[in-house]
Amino acid sequence: MKIANRTFIISGGASGLGLATAHDLHAHGAYVSLLDLNADAGSDIVSSLGPRAKFFEVDVSDTDAIAAAIAGTVAWVKETGKPIGGVVAGAGVGLPGLIIDKKNEPLSISSIDFVLNVNLRGTLDLIRQALPHMTTVQPEGPDGERGVIIMVASSAAFDGQMGQVAYAASKGAVASLTLPLARDLSKYGIRAVTIAPALFESSMTKMISPKVKQSLEKAMEFPKRAGHAEEFARTVRDSIENGMLNGTIIRLDGAMRMPARL
């Protein structure tokens, strides 16, 4: 599928992996619609990228905020004539907590809701609201492709550590819905791919201590380092361009299998 002259909606697009993806797709001729909570960063990014970028301040756990961003993107598409080619659902949060702590107190339901609402509900809500505007796009190429949905899981979906019950649940759900989503969308010529990164340099991992980061890096086979955002963005680009990537989860983890505890 061609990237140039198509519009891609990227949640979490103002920082980390989402921002690297936006830069990469933009460099290959895409129009990028960036959804994020950080309005100041979003404004600066759009100023640097120019007329092929738009920013919308969005909390992905807010259905109305997503709807407004989709409406704004659709209006922009009508102006540019560059159809929506895909969604990169990159907004995510991590809020560690043991399901039962040392004081015999269970993990708060508000903490669980926060993680699930952003990582799972926000992903599904963005996808479902964008899809009506993708299914009607003129199909292109010999396969009659209309677009691609790219979701972000995590290595925690497969080997989450202590304290990652809510996070692993949210990312495991994203991984498990990949195939049924691809099956739902197959008749429209829309693919679904999930990328499951391990330790990557991002705004989320900046919050972990050097000791924890070093411990996680030791669990990687090769290379023994955190992934670079550009490496994630390159995988997104290949997932868009390679039509045979569909209904699958790509582990981007340096053969890392996380230990039970650090």
Image (cartoon, rainbow, N blue to C red):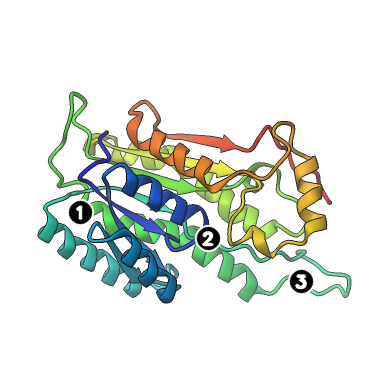
Q: Which amino acid, mark 3?
A: Pro
Name the side, left or right, on which 60 lies relative to 175: left
Which residue occupies 46% across, 55% down?
A: 18
Earlier residue among tags 3 and 1: 3
Q: Which amino acid, mark 1?
A: His
Q: CA distance from mark 3 to mark 1?
A: 42 Å
How would you rate the neighbour count of disc 2 (Cα within 10 Å): few for under 14, some for 14-19, many for 20 or more? many
Q: Which amino acid, mark 2?
A: Gly
Which residue occupies 13% across, 56% down?
A: 80
Which residue occupies 65% across, 42% down?
A: 158
Earlier residue among tags 1 and 2: 2
Q: Nearer the viewer, mark 3 or mark 1?
A: 1
Above/below status of 111 relative to 89 = below
Can you see residue 63?
A: no
Q: CA distance from mark 2 to mark 3?
A: 23 Å
Residue 261: where, in percent of width, then height? 83, 51
How would you rate the neighbour count of disc 1 (Cα within 10 Å): few for under 14, some for 14-19, many for 20 or more? some
Earlier residue among tags 2 and 3: 2
Can you see residue 7?
A: yes
Image-quadrant location for residue 186: top left
Residue in front for this viewpoint, 122 or 76 = 76
Q: CA distance from mark 1 to mark 2?
A: 24 Å
> In the rendered image, which residue does mark 1 sit on?
133
- Label for residue 106? 3
Which residue occupies 58% across, 45% down?
A: 228
